[in-house]
Image (tube, helix red, strand yellow):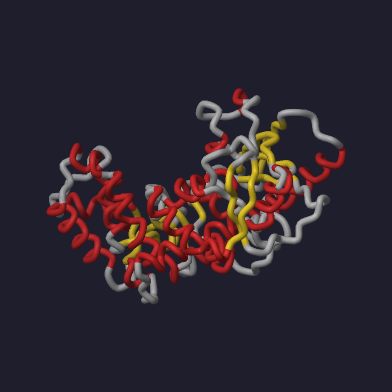
């Protein structure tokens, strides 16, 4: 397999070309999880993988609980299908909690404090009530649980990992929290082995071709657990070698063509960037001066051409329009410029601003 084919296969499996799903929940379930650290841009990450989606449609899926936004896999926000969140949290939550240990000790947060704060959350949010972070902070303070410094962050994350709370819908442009049990229907419990196999198969089918190292970084699992997951599903995947590395992907390769060379506006933290530890195949590192955060493409909105990073983009939303700032690393051909213009129009249509 050549690097070009590898990128085309990733674009197809990630639904960035020839999307095959008709709704946000179906798409997110296929992907396993979609990083949602930047709330507004995460809606585009979902919407751009669907035909003719709008920001309101993705927002509605989150508001109605068809998608769950919480901390899972790694210590950051993700969108997950409600039927997957319980087993996925049970599998990866302990790793996130372990990574928080040093901060918890510095902030004097222990099991006693967390039990008390979780009870406060449960009482405050029962019967379908959804509250914002400031509102919950006020309630905790009244219960004599300090929320200064970073304490509020870790009180909330711990409650998420304990499956006490998760995000609710938005209210007056503010993100709310809701009770997990009231928002997430009961689902089938999986054994650890079943969970490892399910997560590995979901990842390599939707993000492959990818390496074991890629899966380890994406899943937040230890290398031992990630390898176990891969070994459980190897017979359902296809293995290819690129640059002497083993890449795993769907058993049946997507029917992409050499003409499938899209120009895409990828949001920051997109799965096309965060799901892989080695990004040399998509970025040559020669244009760090165009990128923020020490040249790391992960933190930028990316212009993608033929699967490779070719520039950055920014948006400024005004009352009746969105102003786009597009910076390519090199001048574009007329064909690629036309494709970029079309992608800009697609994004503007998604947010209903021209």
In the image, 145 versus 88, the foreground residue is 88
In the image, 18 versus 128, the foreground residue is 18
Q: Position of residue 129 (x, y in %)?
A: 32, 67
Please name the residue shown 52% across and 41% down the image. Answer: 277
Q: Considering only vertical position in the picture, is 236 above or below 271?
A: below
Please name the residue shown 69% across and 39% down the image. Answer: 308
Q: Considering only vertical position in the picture, is 34 above or below 30?
A: above
Q: Position of residue 79 (x, y in %)?
A: 47, 58
Q: How many marks?
A: 0
Task: Farthest residue to the top: give it.
Answer: 289
Q: Position of residue 274 (x, y in %)?
A: 52, 45
Please name the residue shown 27% across and 60% down the image. Answer: 162
Q: Position of residue 11 (x, y in %)?
A: 67, 52
In the image, 167 versus 158, the foreground residue is 158
Q: From the viewer's perspective, is 32 left or right of 105?
A: right
Q: Considering only vertical position in the picture, is 308 above or below 53?
A: above
Q: Considering only vertical position in the picture, is 238 above or below 247?
A: below
Q: From the viewer's perspective, is 339 left or right of 148?
A: right
Q: From the viewer's perspective, is 258 left or right of 253?
A: right
């Amino acid at each position: 397999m050549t690097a070009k084919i590898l990128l085309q296969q990733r674009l197809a499996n990630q639904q960035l070309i020839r999307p095959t799903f008709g709704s946000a929940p179906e798409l997110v379930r296929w992907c396993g999880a979609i990083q949602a650290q930047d709330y507004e841009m995460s809606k585009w990450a979902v919407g751009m993988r669907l035909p003719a989606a709008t920001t309101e449609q993705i927002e509605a899926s989150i508001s109605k609980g068809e998608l769950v936004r919480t901390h899972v896999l790694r210590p950051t926000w993700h969108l997950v299908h409600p039927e997957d969140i319980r087993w996925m949290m049970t599998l990866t939550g302990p790793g996130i909690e372990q990574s928080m240990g040093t901060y918890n000790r510095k902030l004097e947060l222990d099991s006693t404090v967390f039990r008390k704060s979780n009870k406060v959350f449960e009482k405050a949010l029962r019967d379908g009530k959804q509250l914002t972070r400031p509102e919950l902070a006020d309630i905790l303070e009244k219960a004599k649980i300090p929320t200064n410094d970073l304490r509020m962050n870790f009180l909330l994350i711990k409650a998420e990992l304990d499956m006490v709370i998760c995000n609710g819908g938005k209210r007056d442009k503010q993100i709310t929290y809701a009770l997990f049990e009231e928002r997430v229907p009961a689902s089938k419990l999986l054994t650890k082995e079943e969970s490892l196999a399910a997560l590995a198969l979901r990842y390599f089918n939707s993000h492959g071709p990818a390496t074991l190292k890629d899966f380890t970084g994406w899943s937040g699992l230890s290398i031992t657990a990630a390898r176990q997951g891969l070994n459980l599903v190897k017979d359902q995947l296809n293995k290819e070698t690129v640059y002497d590395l083993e890449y795993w992907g769907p058993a049946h390769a997507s029917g992409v063509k050499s003409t499938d060379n899209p120009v895409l506006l990828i949001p920051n933290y997109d799965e096309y960037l965060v799901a892989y530890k080695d990004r040399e195949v998509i970025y040559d590192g020669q244009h760090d001066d165009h990128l923020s955060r020490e040249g790391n493409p992960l933190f930028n909105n990316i212009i993608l051409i033929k699967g490779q990073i070719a520039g950055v983009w920014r948006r400024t939303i005004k009352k009746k329009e969105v102003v786009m700032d597009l910076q390519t690393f090199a001048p574009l051909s007329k064909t690629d410029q036309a494709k970029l213009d079309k992608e800009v129009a697609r994004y503007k249509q998604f947010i209903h601003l021209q």
